[in-house]
Image (spheres, rainbow, N blue to C red):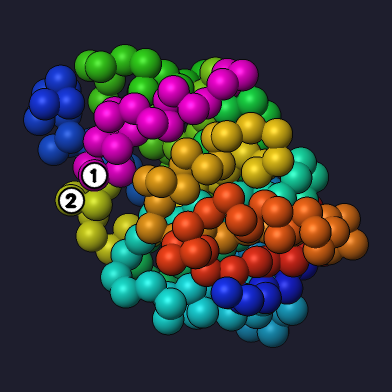
Amino acid sequence: MSANPIFERESAATDERSSQRSIAPAPAPVTLTPSQLEERAIIHRTAVSRPEVDAFRELRTRLLAAVEGSFVALVAPVSSGSGGSFVARNLATALAFDDTKSALLVDCDLRHPSQHVTMKIDTPTGLVEYLEDPEGDLSDVIYETGVQGLRLIPAGTSREIGAEYFSSSRMRLLLDSIRSRHPNCYVFLDGPPVRGTPDARILADIADVVILVAGYGRDTAASIAQAAANFDPNKFVGVVFNEGV
């Protein structure tokens, strides 16, 4: 697995008490072994320099330099198969390498959710269930991943249309709750492909920065430029060319 970061210039009628307990302290998670992390296509720290780990560390460093304070980052692939979920998962992991920071990965590809499968988290509930239930507690859909400092909100039940979910006041409440309770938590939205649906553009409205993922040798320069044109230039921080999923 490898990624080469190239930055070219990412009353709601809900009980206030729910947001206050939205991310309650959880029991200490079981830490995954290096072999388990590799099975899940997740980078990990080693004593020896590894190109894929260094690539994500470099990407993380550039992103932190470009944005002041914690942020919500949308990671969106140009097209299906470009490796957006791989990049989102490992960029969040690289952020969590810093013990003073934490990362929350949110699977927002409601048509083809994959993070819970790749990370081997067996769950029937996630983002969709939280957004559909006005009384739902956010802590019920946040899962430990086995990676220190990294947690996941899986997509939940798949849906053909995500626009209504992502533009809802409850989606904004979710992000506001995380910001207010955990100022050092960086949120990564694993978005659906830009081509084909408006979902990525809608997610960009609630994100602070947008990172586009292009499949190396897969997405053409024209398709990358067309995808990038969907986003506010003030939020768009660059393109990651991904060589493997």
- Queried whether the magenta region covers residue 21, the answer comes back as no
180 lies above or below 217 = above
In this view of the protein, which residue sits in the foreground, 104 or 150?
Answer: 104
Residue 211 in view here: yes
Q: Secondary structure at mark 2?
A: helix
In this view of the protein, which residue sits in the foreground, 80 or 101?
Answer: 80
Check disc 1: other Cα within 10 Å, few if <14, some if 14-19, many if 20+. few
Question: Label 1 sits on what residue type?
Answer: Asp
Question: Label 2 sits on what residue type?
Answer: Ser
Quadrant in which residue 7 is drawn: bottom right
Quadrant in which residue 218 is drawn: bottom right
Q: Residue furthest right?
A: 217
Which residue matches tag 1? 176
In this view of the protein, which residue sits in the foreground, 137 or 26?
Answer: 137
* Residue 16 in picture, x, y percent from top left: 10, 30
Magenta part of the chain: 158-177
Which residue matches tag 2? 180
- What residue sits 48% from the left and 73% below the top? 63
- What residue sits 41% from the left and 46% below the top? 205
Q: Kindly check if marks 2 and 1 are in contact, taking CB atoms under 8 A apart as contact.
A: yes
20 lies above or below 212 = above
* Residue 231 in picture, x, y percent from top left: 53, 54
* Residue 198 in picture, x, y percent from top left: 57, 34
